[in-house]
Image (spheres, rainbow, N blue to C red):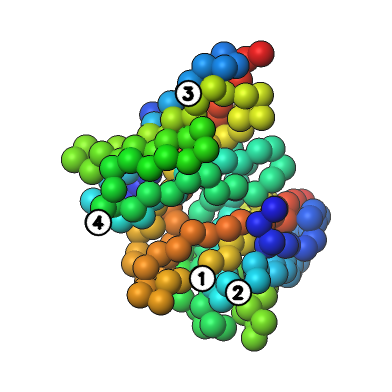
């Protein structure tokens, strides 16, 4: 177990609705990254939060937004859901090294979203 | 552009044999690589990582080799077990500072009893 938890585990929404997914990072980790994994594909980077600020964004439209809280937990919000948003949403936590070096990202189990 | 690709989408290996999963990357500036294992219905699980100042790193039953000359990465699993059946992804850090991971499509490893 990585210590990264996500909720809910599964979710069914209809097109046009809004959804909020939640992630609790591993203890001591101040960075949370969100990824979208379509069936049969590798995870695609959505965005990253470091100390409550967005710290990089992938090629996703503005209807994908996020938050990070003082306890470093995070939310992913998706507005105006589309059928293609159906995927496994993963969050990963990490703690960048003091020298700014990259550190391993540890993933949660994911939230499987189905948009009908 | 940035991409991480895998040579084989599927790989079947007899239980007890060694397996090798290959990965090619295109960004010569990448300096950190990670192998993840993903079982059905679960998130990616960290296996082993390697930084660009190394060419080999060993873990428990796993070895990662990095060839920067040809931008190639491989994961070797020794004495495969049924529990090794999963999809394996290599990933690279492409942007120093925000630690975005770029994943390949993955290789499905099946262990034959």
Looking at the rendered image, the disc whose residue lies closer to the viewer, 4 or 1, is 1
Name the element at disc 1: loop
Alpha-carbon span between mark 2 and mark 4: 29 Å
**Mark seen at residue A95:** 1
The disc at residue A28 is 2
- State whether residue B56 is above or below residue A100: above
Task: Evaluate whether label 4 is on the same chain as label 3.
Answer: yes
Q: Could you tell which of marks 2 and 1 lies nearer the N-terminus?
A: 2
Read off the residue under disc 3: B19
Q: CA distance from mark 4 to mark 3?
A: 28 Å
Classify residue B73 as left or right of residue B81: left
Mark 4 and mark 3 lie on one chain; the one further toward the N terminus is 3
Q: Tags 2 and 1 in contact by the CB under 8 Å rule? A: yes
Q: Element at badge 3? A: strand
Question: Can see residue A102?
Answer: yes
Q: Chain of mark 4?
A: B
Q: The disc numbered 1 marks a residue on which chain? A: A
Asked where in the image residue A81 lies, by quadrant, the reply is bottom right
Residue at point 69%, 45% (across, down): B42
Which secondary structure lies at badge 4? loop
Residue A63's image quarter? bottom right
| Quadrant containing the C terminus of chain B in the rendered view | top right
Q: Residue furthest bottom?
A: A70
In the image, what residue occupies the spot 40% across and 64% down?
A102
- Given the image, what chain letter belongs to the residue carrying mark 2? A
SS of the residue under disc 2: loop
What mark, if any, has residue B29 been given in the picture?
Answer: 4
Q: Alpha-carbon neighbours of circle 2 within 10 Å: few (<14), some, or many (≥20)?
A: few
For disc 3, the neighbor class at 10 Å (few under 14, some 14 to 19, many from 20) is many
Give residue B82's mark.
none
């Amino acid at each position: 177990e990585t210590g990264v938890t996500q909720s809910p585990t599964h979710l069914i929404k209809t097109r046009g609705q809004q959804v909020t997914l939640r992630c609790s990072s591993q203890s001591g980790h101040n960075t949370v990254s969100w990824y979208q994994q379509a069936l049969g594909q590798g995870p695609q980077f959505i965005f990253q939060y470091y100390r409550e600020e967005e710290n990089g964004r992938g090629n996703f439209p503005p209807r994908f937004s996020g938050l990070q809280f003082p306890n470093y937990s995070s939310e992913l919000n998706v507005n105006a859901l589309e059928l293609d948003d159906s995927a496994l949403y993963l969050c990963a936590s990490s703690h960048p090294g003091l020298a700014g070096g990259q550190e391993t990202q540890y993933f949660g189990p994911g939230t499987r979203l189905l948009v009908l | 552009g940035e991409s991480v690709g895998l040579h084989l989408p599927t790989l079947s290996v007899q239980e007890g044999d060694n397996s090798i999963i290959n990965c090619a990357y295109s960004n010569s500036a990448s300096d950190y690589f990670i192998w993840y294992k993903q079982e059905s219905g679960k998130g990616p699980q960290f296996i082993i990582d390697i930084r660009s100042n190394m060419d080999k790193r060993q873990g428990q039953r796993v070895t990662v080799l990095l060839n920067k000359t040809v931008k190639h990465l491989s994961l070797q699993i020794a004495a495969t077990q049924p529990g090794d059946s999963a999809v394996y992804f290599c990933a690279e850090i492409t942007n120093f500072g925000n630690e975005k991971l770029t994943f390949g499509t993955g290789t499905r490893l099946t262990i034959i009893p």
